[in-house]
Every structure is written in structure tokens, then in C-alpha cells.
Image (tube, rainbow, N blue to C red):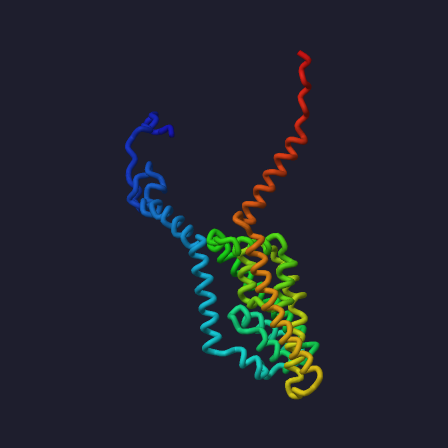
Amino acid sequence: MFDHATGATPRTDAPLTDHPCTGRSDAAGPRAGRPDGARADAPRVVRFARVLLSPWARLALLLVVLASAATAVLLYEPQKMLADGWPPQLGGAMAAVLFGVAYGLCTVAFVPRPILNLAAGALFGTALGLTTSIGGTVLGAGISFALGRYLGQDALRPMLRGRVLLAADGVLSRHGFRSMLAIRLFPGVPFAAANYCAAVSRMRYLSFLTATGLGSIPNTLAYVIAGSEASSPTSPAFVISTAFIVVTSIAGVVVAWCKRHSIGRSAGPTSPVAASEAKTEETSETEEAAKTPALPLSNK
């Protein structure tokens, strides 16, 4: 800046003094006061986040959640509260909705579904009890599937070894709706085990929920009828529903046993994943060879 009093221009190379308030040199700028520790801690934060989001950390979180839910069931026994008509101050549709939500949460915590189905029939009758039970079944299965898929799949899929496990995973992954529908129709596989096995496989979420809802209707209906007719155990409805439960349970065990052996025989020495990949490669090579034009032969 030009000085009118002296007619001279001040020097621009004069040393800059420290700022009177901050004590830092004006040439240093605002970044000079930033501590080096903040920049040094950034990689640690990134590594810590990666550890928390790693497959094994998520699997550990899943185990903690399931163990906590099972412990809460053992301590508070919510199935008895539901069977006694909880919540007592509500009735009608609102009570059925709350019962369905509690039903779903209880199935996530490994409460047996037959107890809840009997309670639904005793409290709400056949029609409303069936609707409530199927809604709670789909809700609990969906929560379990989501937990297993997002917290356990990445860590558990590399652990699939053996012909039987690989074959079962291939069947669930390729024929998700049909396989889950058969599992629900014949209750030979525990409800929670089927949920988490399906979550570890590559089964689609919508196929899983649809097959669970449709396949659970017959067996759930039998339990609901038995619960609604529990006061008259000699009635035809109670006898027929009880006989249906016994027959389907035995049939489920037989089907599961036969299916296990058929899967073991069809697995072979090669896993379904490897066989599928080899078939895909062979198909792609065949298509490329068909698209490649043939070169004309020389007459020489």
C-alpha cells in the first residue's frame, strides 16, 4: 500500500509477527495449530470401524443378541403371559395385533410355536387366532432371516464344508420357494433352524416370507383349532386336529430323513457351487464358439 506521508511503498518482505491473540505467526495459517495427533488417529478410527463391521464381529453380535433373547425368555417366560391373556386391559383387534407382534418376537427368542398357536386359539378362536398366528409367524421368520443374513451370512458361508451341507445350500439357494414351502408343510425341521439356514443360503427374502406364510397355514390351523377346543377334548374338531398334528409330525421326520439321504447321494464328490460354475463356464464357451464365424479353407 502506498504511503502518502513519506511517498514510499512499504516492504513486503518484512518478517511477519505473531498474532496478538493466538500467538501463532500469520504466515502459518489456521492449519498450523491443528495437532498432529488428530491426523494420526484417523487410520486408527478406520481400522476400528473395519473391525466392528467385519464378518466375525457381526457374527459375535448375532450370538449376543440371540443369547440375550433366550435368557430373557427363560427369566420372564413371555409365553405364559400370552397364554394368560396379556394384555388384560385390551380386547378385540388391538389385542390380536399386540399378540401377533409379541408372537413374532417370541419366535425370534426360540419360544416354541405350538405353545403360541394353542394360546392364540384359546384366546381369539379359530379365525382370528389363525390370522394372528400366521402374522406373528411371518414377522418372526422375517426378523430371524434379516438377522442371519446381515449379521451371520458373510462369516458362516465360507464354513460350509461337506457334501451334505453344500448340497442343502445349493437346494435352498436354487429352489428357495419350493424348498421352504416343503419345510413348512412338514414340520420336521425346527422353526428357528430353518430360518437361519435359509438366511445363510442365497434364498431371496420375498420367496422365504411367501413360502413361510403359505406353508405354515395347515399345521398352524391344527394347533389353533386344538387350542380353541381345548375345553372339550372329546369334540370331533379337537380329535381331528390332534390327529393331524401327530400325522404331520411323523411325516415330517420321515421326509426330512429321506431328504437327507437323497441330498447326500446326489451331492457327489463335487459341490453344487463348483458344478454350477463349471456348467456356466461350459455354456459360455459353447455360446462363444457358436458366435465365432468359421474361417474359409484355402484351396492351396
- Percent position (x, y) of residue 62? 47, 62
Q: Decide which of 171, 151 is in the foreground and name it.
A: 171
- Dividing the picture into quadrants, the one containing residue 13 is top left
The residue closer to the viewer here, 99 or 31, is 99
Q: Say above or below: 207 vs 7.
A: below
Q: Which residue lies furthest to the top in this view?
A: 300
Q: Where is residue 220 in the image (x, y as percent from the top left)?
A: 64, 73
Left/right of residue 58 with respect to residue 97 in the rendered view: left
What residue is at 59 percent from the left and 62 percent from the top? 258
Image location of residue 193, percent across then percent down: 53, 64
| Residue lying at 58% horizontally and 68% vertically, measured from the top left | 253
Q: In which quarter of the image is residue 279?
A: top right
* Residue 45 horizontal/vertical position (percent): 38, 50
**In front: 293, or 298?**
298
Q: Could you tell me which quadrant the N terminus lies in?
A: top left
Q: 58 left or right of 134?
A: left
Q: How many marks?
A: 0
146 up-or-down from 17: above or below: below
Point out the image quarter for the C terminus. top right
Is residue 94 in view from this perspective?
no
At 67% from the left edge and 31% from the top edge, which residue is drawn? 290
Q: Is residue 10 visible?
A: yes
